[in-house]
Image (cartoon, rainbow, N blue to C red):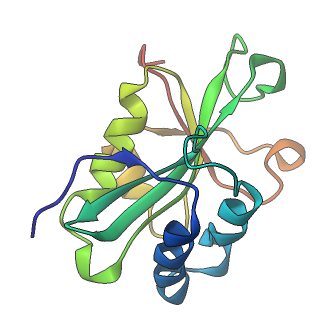
Amino acid sequence: MTLSKVVPLKINYKTIEDFKKFREYGLEELSMLEDLEANMIEDGANSPFFGVYDDEKLVGRMSLYKVEAKYDKYFDPPEGYYELFKLEVLPEYRGKRIGSMLVKYAKSLGHPIKTNARNGSRNFWLKMGFSPVKYDPIRDRGENPYIWHPDGF
């Protein structure tokens, strides 16, 4: 196994084929295929998708979307942050720290991060330094938000 570092994923038809492999294993809400197809433009575009490869095989992925401070409902005072979506690792690669690699990459960008913890992932997010936020039924609408701030608050 030769894992790559975290790299931005190109928005092209090869990446669509790679994403289809995840859809087979992941939950429907984790599917990034529709997101990718909606962003289908030139390869050189800024991609919100990041991944880790084992040689030529995409084995872990996530999306990061920048949220402007004016839409921030999680940090006080409000500031721009990244929303980390759809972190997923292929089943045969789980337990090899690929998810941690992806989250550490997101943290290295130096901005606060908000994510939604799926069932059973609470310990992972806590281990990665994220904190649960007090649930607000109007703001969170059934989500399970966790946040991380580079300054530790």
Side (left or right) of 108 relative to 35: left
Q: Position of residue 84 (x, y in %)?
A: 56, 45
* Residue at the far right in the pictured view: 138
Residue depicted at 58% across the width and 44% down the height? 48
The quarter holding residue 64 reads top right
Q: Quadrant of residue 28?
A: bottom right
Residue reaching furthest to the bottom: 24
In percent of width and height, residue 111 lies at: 51, 21
Nearest the viewer among 13 and 114 is: 13
Front residue (pair 84, 148): 84
Name the residue at the left extreme: 1
Is residue 98 depicted above or below 148 in this figure? below
The answer to whether 68 is drawn above or below residue 93 in the figure is above
Q: Is residue 95 left or right of residue 22?
A: left
In depth, the one of 42 and 56 nearer the eye is 42
Q: Position of residue 129 (x, y in %)?
A: 36, 36
Q: Is residue 136 left or right of residue 20?
A: right
Using the rendered image of the protein, determine whether residue 119 is visible from the camera's viewpoint. Answer: no
User: Which residue is depicted at the point 27% across and 72% down?
Assistant: 94
Instruction: Point out the image quarter for the N terminus.
Output: bottom left
- In front of the other: 48 or 72: 48
Residue under the point 52% across and 74% down = 19
List x then y, in percent, for residue 103: 38, 44
The number of numbered badges drawn on the structure is: 0
Is residue 77 visible from the viewing direction of this image? yes
Q: What's the residue at 21%, 69% (across, down)?
A: 95
Q: Is residue 119 above or below residue 113?
A: below
